[in-house]
Image: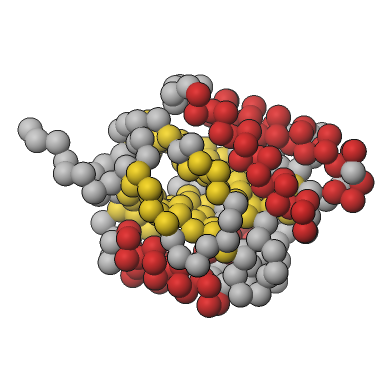
Amino acid sequence: MKAAFFSSPGPVRAENEDGLFLGETMVGRDMLAPEFVEIDGHNALAAVADGMGGGPGGREAAFLVLTKLSELTQAPLTDDGESLIAQNLKDAAKALTMVAQRNPALKQMGAVVAGLWLAGEKALAFNCGDSRVYRIREGFLDLLTKDHSLVYELYVNGQIKEEAMAGHPLKNILTSSIQDEAEAPQVFFRRTPLSFGDSFLICTDGVWDSASRAELEGWAALGPEEGSRLLAASLTKKAEDNCTFIWLYDEAPPPEG
């Protein structure tokens, strides 16, 4: 399994409160172009986190959540993967609360997260908040996660169209995040079988808010490597928020027989 990854504050924001974890690597640096690595697709975790609270609080929250998630890679994905992730994120919320109690200036710190736990021929997608996991199959994007946000609820209720979610004035109102241990984070899960040719885009809201479905599918048609370069170049020019993505793909030939 191969991966392209990218993280940038974008041309508007001064600080980058996003982060990502991939395989065994935590990434918290700003990038001008995507980088490429190989990971073990038989047991790997890929996740992005978007910090909330401004300044150091948001960044610290994002990486605390990712650090907690990284502990899951010590064991393979099993039937209780959903409960393990849910408990892990609940523990992260508790840790954030303790940090904020020690430093009242960080009271609003929190994060949202999305990720994919790979296990050979299957994978488990998950999210809390408005970061997303897409599957790209035969040139089409399929959203595997569900946003915990007011505008997503408006969309699923038929009150607005999908393309209206990006840039909507109520877009930043979340219905769940990893922030306060008093209220357990809502986590959405979806298991999916892996088929040859599938690729996956895991991203913070700064990505899907800046690139339309048509643009993403157009870049996907060029292949993950060229597509990820064009996506990163577009984000560095027009993203109005921090933007981070992981593009997972496999170029190995399908097994014979």
Relative horizontal placement of residue 40, taking residue 186 as reference (left or right) = left
Q: Residue at x 58, y 34 (%)?
A: 69
Residue 186 visible, this angle? no
Residue 203 visible, this angle? yes
* Quadrant hosting residue 55: bottom right
Q: Is residue 234 above or below residue 77?
A: below
Residue 25, how many percent across, how many down?
51, 41
Q: Residue at x 28, y 66 (%)?
A: 222
Residue 104, how many percent across, how many down?
92, 46
Of the 4 image quadrants, the one containing the C terminus is top left
* Quadrant hosting residue 11: bottom right
Of the 4 image quadrants, the one containing the N terminus is top left
Please name whichever residue, 28 or 188, is drawn nearer the observer in this view of the structure. 28
Q: Is residue 169 above or below residue 88?
A: below
Residue 115, how many percent across, how many down?
51, 43
Residue 124, how many percent across, how many down?
45, 36
Please name whichever residue, 89 or 245, is drawn nearer the observer in this view of the structure. 245
